[in-house]
Image (cartoon, rainbow, N blue to C red):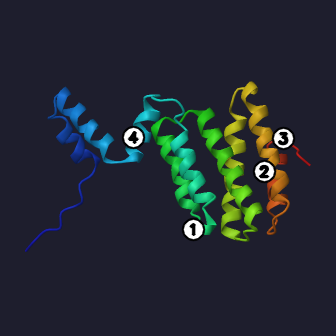
Amino acid sequence: MTTKKNAPGWSDVKTKLADFDRAGLIGLVQDLYAASKDNQAFLNARFALGGDVLKPYKATIDRWLWPDVFKNLDTSVAKAKKAISDYKKAISQPEGLAELMVFYCERAAGFSNDVGLQDEGYFDALVRMFGQALKTIDGLPQDCKPALMARLDAVRHISHNFGYGVGDDIDDLLAEFGFDGR
């Protein structure tokens, strides 16, 4: 009779890591860094390396929210949102998080307006992200808010070109957070 073994988890990895010396840990991190661009973006963001740590996350958002329609590429709200989640795990600086959320809204609204996309799920995700962006911006220092809010106001204007009540939902969110953009 065979027993079913559970899949290894973090506690198993942690136990194995305890046996590593400093050089072994550095070698492991080096291997992880070389293994994928996602790992590189994570470590670069975590250690504030390079110029713009948001660049790879923005590139992912851009790819999945504003795909090249001439190459028959698809959109993916989940993959775009994952970029924001990955940034949050790597460093989670509120200003960077707000920037990525606003960028998400700009790209989603811009693509929808540019190609005439009529996708209720895509619009629902845009409205949810708009609300999350407002909540994040609300917690920022006062001097950081105006530029981000101006960009969201441009998204609000564009959103009134869509169906499904997107513009009205965004107006409601703005009013809820005390930003009456009407």
In this image, 160 relative to 152: left or right? right
Q: Earlier in the sequence, mark 4 or mark 2?
A: 4
What residue would you read off at disc 3?
Answer: 178
Answer yes or no: is residue 172 visible.
no
Q: Residue at x 79, y 32 (%)?
A: 146
Q: Residues within 10 Å of mark 4 (few under 14, many from 20)?
A: some
Task: Measure how far apart labels 3 and 1 are at the Cα level.
Answer: 42 Å
Q: Which mark is residue 155?
A: 2
Marks 3/1 in contact by CB < 8 Å: the verdict is no
Under circle 1, the secondary element is: helix
Residue type, mark 1 in image? Lys
Q: Earlier in the sequence, mark 1 or mark 4?
A: 4
Q: Position of residue 2 (x, y in %)?
A: 10, 71
Residue type, mark 4 in image? Gln
What residue would you read off at disc 1?
Answer: 71
Q: Earlier in the sequence, mark 3 or mark 1?
A: 1
Is residue 25 positioned above or below 62 on the image?
A: above
Task: Measure how far apart labels 4 and 2 are at the Cα level.
Answer: 31 Å
Q: Residues within 10 Å of mark 1 (few under 14, many from 20)?
A: few
Marks 4/2 in contact by CB < 8 Å: the verdict is no
In the image, farthest residue toward the front = 70
Q: Which label sits in the foreground, 1 or 4?
A: 1
Q: Which label sits in the foreground, 2 or 1?
A: 1
In this image, 10 relative to 111: left or right? left
Is residue 49 positioned above or below 149 on the image?
A: above
What residue would you read off at disc 4?
Answer: 40
